[in-house]
Structure formats: structure tokens, C-alpha cells
Amino acid sequence: AFGPEVVPQGPEDVMFGLIAAYRRDQDPNKVDLGIGAYRDNNAKPWVLPVVKQADELLRKDPNLNHEYLPIAGLPEFTSASQQLICGANSPAIKDKRVLSVQTISGTGAVHLGALFLSKFYSPANKEAKVVYASAPTWANHNQIFTNVGLEMKSYPYFNKKTCALDLDAMLASLNSAPSGSIILLHACAHNPTGVDPTQEQWKKIAQVIKDKQHFPFFDCAYQGFASGSLAKDGWAINYFIEQGFELLIAQSFAKNFGLYGERAGCFHFVTGPASSAQDTIARVGSQLAILQRSEISNPPAYGARIASLVLNDKALFAQWEEDLRTMSGRIIEMRKALRGKLEQLGTPGEWNHITEQIGMFSFTGLSEEQVGKLRDQWHVYMTKNGRISMAGLNTKNVEYFAKAVDSVVR
Ligand code: PMP
């Protein structure tokens, strides 16, 4: 019943294929710049000290059991997540205009939002039921939205010449999209480019979205991880909420807590300051609960318990902020080191974008051919689009990588 005419062989996931190839490589100098997970200066996974502490506390708790969480997740986790992403003094939280559901990390939150939109989003102009994502965007966005039957289009974002944001083209594209379109935005640390709008640019983006009555959907996978400041990385979302938008947020705790495999995340629906807000929240909440029940029944507990302990305790929270500064600080140092080495070597081209971009990733501007040479001749593993995970660099391999880049660029 499932011959190749109905189930063709699918392509291997690019990211996970890259990891497998890296693992097979026996060269002692091999460098993994593919995976989007933090590594310490010894290229090893890092359990955040605050997560260790919270874990020990959890294990000591005699009342801990393995019961189901409620459908919408651990209440103390979802309310703390809400405050983190909207800002503790958010007008939306004060007015109870935020509805939050715990999800299978950020991917699950994007999926739940996509599913909700596919079922319930009904713009006056039917042609507006389209999701506009940046070009490029996280590859999984395309699959997640198209899997629930939503059409995907793109708006220009990255300027290949400058390796920076192409704001004018982005604004023009949003302006010409059918009024009421869904606009997918990366809250901070844009993946894969590392290019974020400035606050002034965000204001212009918000204005066009407002003028066109578009519907914003924020994907936030790196709060605190980008700049080291939770507030700074959450600024764009806070600003949109202050502007009174109705919007969606997908929040991941994979990177900022290093809880990748624990799948801790949250989906938030924020409605505008209308008199009917409470009614909207109640109805939307009831439908999200039905969707959640049929999809995963209830979310996984462990990662949410860890994050919840930290988010709800002053001392642990302060330790977390320090851990965030450790991770983001090391990445910023590696950006400086890489740019410095390339400039020292006189590598052809401009390398200022390496330090101007932010977060886990950098779009180097290297071509597919150069990426191939890096892999074949230098055992450096990165995606074909020229993206590198800065977390894969450390004081021991950054010079090797710079020399490798220098050799393939010349
Ligand atoms: N969105 C973006 C833009 C991401 O980069 C990621 C992590 N790669 C995610 C969502 C979700 O990741 P996770 O499901 O591990 O939280």
C-alpha cells in the first residue's frame, strides 16, 4: 500500500545529516559549526550551573511524582514564562489579555500557533491567509506551516552584498502583501542570519504591520542568549504589545536554559486592549485546549519544572542571568576573535558583519562551493548556505577556522 509512487524517499534532514557526517570524520582538527546548540570553550555541551542547582532541588522534593500535567501545562511555569516574554509590567498581563499554553519547546509552540491559525484565522480578504516569513528563515518554519495547510510566502530580509538587513525591501514587501497577512518575525538572534533590526527599524516594521492590519507571529528562541540581557532581547515583543497588537508568540527555553532535549516551551496568544478581550481569551483558550489535547494530550513536565523553579526564585533567576551572560559573552568574544584573525590574515572581503551580527549564528557570506571545500579540505562542518554556529568556535579552533576560511576565499 505504500509504494514509492505514494511514499517517495524523502530527503535527509540537512542539519541532522551534517551531524552524522561530522561524527564519522576521524580528523583530530574537525570543527562542528553546524548544530545550533551551545558549546563551552572545550567544544562540550554545557549544563548551566543554575540548571544543576534547580535539578538538585527537584530531586530532593519528596512530593515529586510522574503524574500528568494539566492540558495547558504547569501553571507556575506558564505564568512566569508570560512575564518573562511580555515584561513583568506588561499592560497585557495586567489586563489579563495573555493566554499561555506549555508546548513541546519552541517547535511545538510554532506548530500550535500554526495549527490554531490554520483552523481559525479568517481575514476579510481570503488571500491574506498566508504566512510571510523572512528570506531566509529557519528551515523548519516552512515545513511546520505547510504541514497544517497554510501557504508560505517570503519577504526580503538579508542583503547578500552587505550581509545586513535589507529594511527598505522588507518594508516594501510587507506593504504590498494583502492586508491582514500573517507576518512571522524572529524576536531576536535571527536564525540563520544573525541579523536583527535595530529598535528604530522595529518601529518602522511595526508601523507597516499596523497600517496594513497584518497579524504578527513572533518566534522567540533566543531570549537572553543573544545580547545577554533578557529585556533587550525581548524588546521588540514588548514594543508590539505596547502598541496594542493582537499577536502570537512561540517561546523556547532550549537555548537560554540549555534544556534542548527536555522540550520546554510556551505558546502565548496576546489580544489587544478591547473591551471584549476577556471573552476572546476565554474562547481562544478553550480551542487551544482542544487542539493541545488531540496533539499531545499534555506537555512534558521535567524541563518545565526546572525552568519554573528558576523563573520563580529571585536568587536562582540572578544566577540564570549570570549563566546567560557567560554563554552570550563567550559567543561575542568568538565573534571578535574570528573577525580579528581574518583581518589579521588579510582575508579578501569585509568581515565586519561577523561582529555586527548577533546570537548563535552568523551568515558568513561564504558560497556553497567554499563551504564544500571547507568540509573536504579542512574538516569544517557547516550548512551549505554559509551559516556558522558561533558556539562551535573556541579559543583552540578559531585560528584554525580563520586559516581555513582564508584558504578557500583566496
Ligand atoms: N525557532 C527558531 C528560529 C529556532 O532557531 C529554533 C531552534 N533551532 C526553534 C524555533 C525551536 O527550537 P526548539 O524546538 O528546540 O525549542
Image (cartoon, rainbow, N blue to C red):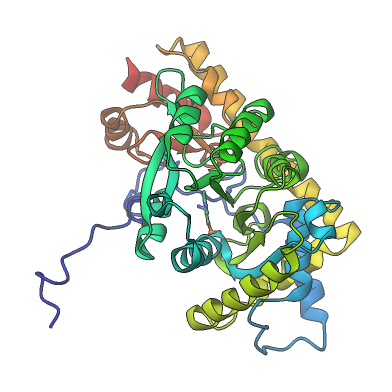
Horizontal and vertical percent for residue 174? 47, 35
Residue 26's x, y, as percent?
34, 48
Q: Residue at x 46, y 49 (%)?
A: 35
The residue that appears at 49% across and 61% down in the rendered structure is 121
Inspect this view and state whether residue 267 appears. Answer: yes
Q: Quadrant of residue 293?
A: bottom right
**x 55%, y 81%: residue:** 290
Q: Is residue 46 left or right of residue 293?
A: right
Quarter of the figure with the N terminus:
bottom left
Residues 70 and 91: in front is 91
* Residue 75 image offset from top left, x and y in percent: 76, 75
Is residue 395 visible to the viewer in this orientation of the structure? no
Furthest residue in direction right, as rendered:
314
Residue nearer the viewer, 394 or 300: 300
Determine whether, in the image, residue 176 is placed left or right of residue 98.
left
Q: Is residue 368 above or below residue 284?
A: above
